[in-house]
């Protein structure tokens, strides 16, 4: 009985640590979307912020999202890019909305890249 309890405890610790990483990646993804979108809407540009957001997006794409959902996520990314390029014609708010969607699309780019990397990794090197 004691061996089984130790084994169950070890499995729970592994499950909890995996959940913690997923939770951190989920929240970093959400914060990254918010920061990128708000910075884009107000026109704030910073190279360090761009690099940090790109790294967060790449990590989220590699380790948080399911690479099997690449087609649906890629289609959503293309729709956001199309919306970003077409909303500038709106009077008064067009520049803000365009900045919002452009920054949102710029954040999603590394996420999609991470998903593509994981898709091909799982397809050719991993167990799917």
Image: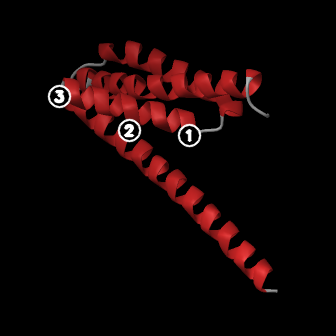
Question: Under tag 1, what secondary structure?
Answer: helix
Q: How far is disc 3 from disc 2 in space, using C-alphas?
A: 14 Å
Disc on the earlier residue, 1 or 3 = 3
Q: Tell me where residue 112 appears, x and y as whole percent.
A: 53, 25
Question: Under tag 2, what secondary structure?
Answer: helix
Front residue of this view, candidates 98 and 70: 70
Kindly identify the residue that appears in the image at 49 percent across and 38 percent down: 60
Would you place residue 4 above or below residue 52 in this image? below
Kindly identify the residue that appears in the image at 74 percent across and 73 percent down: 7
Quadrant in the picture for residue 89 = top left
Query: In this figure, which residue is indicated by the disc labeled 2?
Result: 33
Kindly identify the residue that appears in the image at 54 percent across and 52 percent down: 22
Q: Tell me where residue 62 appears, x and y as whole percent.
A: 55, 34
Colouring scheme applied when the structure was drawn:
secondary structure
Query: In this figure, which residue is indicated by the disc labeled 1?
Result: 63
Front residue of this view, candidates 118 and 4: 4
User: Mark 2, mark 1: which one is toward the viewer?
Assistant: 1
Query: In this figure, which residue is indicated by the disc labeled 3?
Result: 44
Q: How far is disc 1 from disc 3 in space, using C-alphas?
A: 28 Å
Quarter of the picture containing the N terminus is: bottom right
Quarter of the picture containing the C terminus is: top right
């Amino acid at each position: 009985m004691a061996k089984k309890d130790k084994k169950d405890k070890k499995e729970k610790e592994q499950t909890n640590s995996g959940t913690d990483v997923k939770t951190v990646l989920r929240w970093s993804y959400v914060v990254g979307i918010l920061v990128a979108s708000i910075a884009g809407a107000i026109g704030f540009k910073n190279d360090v912020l761009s690099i940090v957001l790109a790294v967060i997006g790449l990590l989220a794409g590699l380790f948080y999202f399911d690479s099997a959902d690449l087609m649906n996520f890629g289609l959503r990314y293309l729709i956001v890019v199309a919306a970003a390029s077409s909303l500038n014609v709106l009077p008064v708010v067009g520049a803000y909305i365009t900045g919002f969607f452009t920054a949102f699309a710029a954040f999603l780019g590394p996420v999609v890249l991470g998903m593509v990397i994981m898709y091909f990794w799982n397809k050719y090197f991993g167990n799917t």
